[in-house]
Image (cartoon, coloured by chain):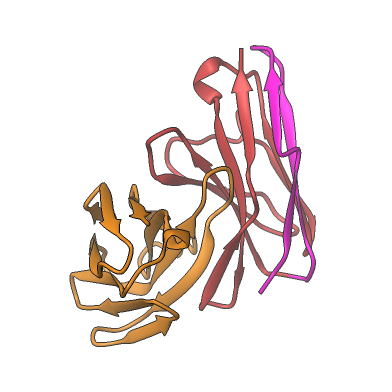
Amino acid sequence: SAVISQKPSRDICQRGTSLTIQCQVDSQVTMMFWYRQQPGQSLTLIATANQGSEATYESGFVIDKFPISRPNLTFSTLTVSNMSPEDSSIYLCSVGTGQTKAFFGQGTRLTVV
Amino acid sequence: EDQVTQSPEALRLQEGESSSLNCSYTVSGLRGLFWYRQDPGKGPEFLFTLYSAGEEKEKERLKATLTKKESFLHITAPKPEDSATYLCAVRDSGGGADGLTFGKGTHLIIQP
């Protein structure tokens, strides 16, 4: 299994500001993903973080709002830009090991006030 | 569009009372059905991946099964420590995306 570290684990931010969430994996992985888990809702895929190229975003998510970096095979960042209270959620990093398993970090609990 | 529906939304059992959780799915082509356990304040913990109808996997008191339309997570003689939210997710073969589509989960409470 892969060990995934996410930072910060939680934060309270002012509206209009931005927060960058970091995801570090203990081994090289091909696939890294970012999800959002809103209260009472399913986990929703935001984007696939591609190493060496732009992230691939799912419908309803755009790069200007959620810029993603993937500088190498063990690290990625997700920025939540120009935040509003609707962005309050848990943000989760996930990695895939081949096609058989997918592991998650502990999540970042974001509250926007 | 992929869809995953889990039932029931919540389930309360007595310790030792076996039951099953359901996950119904709609995909263009299944490239894996995943089960996770999520404890409050934590990320999902991987349990199983199933790929084809008829496949079964077991881990301690949990057994996952798969048909062409749904998956079941059977819990045998559960203990209070099995209390958690259980999530089901699918990976579709269409569109080239490798991410997962999740259901809303079943919140399971095991009472001593």
Looking at the rendering, in which quadrant would you find the N terminus of chain A?
A: bottom right
- In this rendering, would A63 be left or right of B16? right
- Would residue A54 be found to the left or right of residue B87 on screen? right
Decide whether residue A77 is among the magenta residues.
no
- Residue A64, visible in the rendered structure: no
Where, by quadrant of the figure, is residue A30 drawn?
bottom right
Identify the residue at image location x=34%, y=47%: B104
**Front residue (pair A86, A105):** A105
| Res A12 quadrant in image | top right
**Is residue A4 located in the magenta-colored stretch of the structure?**
yes
Q: Is residue A49 above or below residue B56?
A: above
Q: Quadrant of residue B14?
A: bottom left
The image shows residue A9 at horizontal and vertical percentages of 71, 39
Q: Position of residue A37 (x, y in %)?
A: 48, 40
Relative to A104, residue B91 above or below: below
Q: Is residue B53 above or below residue B37?
A: below
| Chain depicted in orange | B
Q: Residue furthest front?
A: B112
- Asked whether the viewer can see residue A106, the reply is yes
**Quadrant for the C terminus of chain A in the image:** top right
x, y percent for residue B87: 39, 57
- Comparing B68 with A46, the one in front is B68
Q: How many marks?
A: 0
Q: Which residues are magenta?
A: A1-28
Q: Which hue is chain A drawn in?
A: red
**What residue lies at 24% left-to-right and 87% top-to-bottom?**
B54
Residue for point 25% across, 67% down:
B17
Image coords of residue A17 (percent x, y) = 71, 16
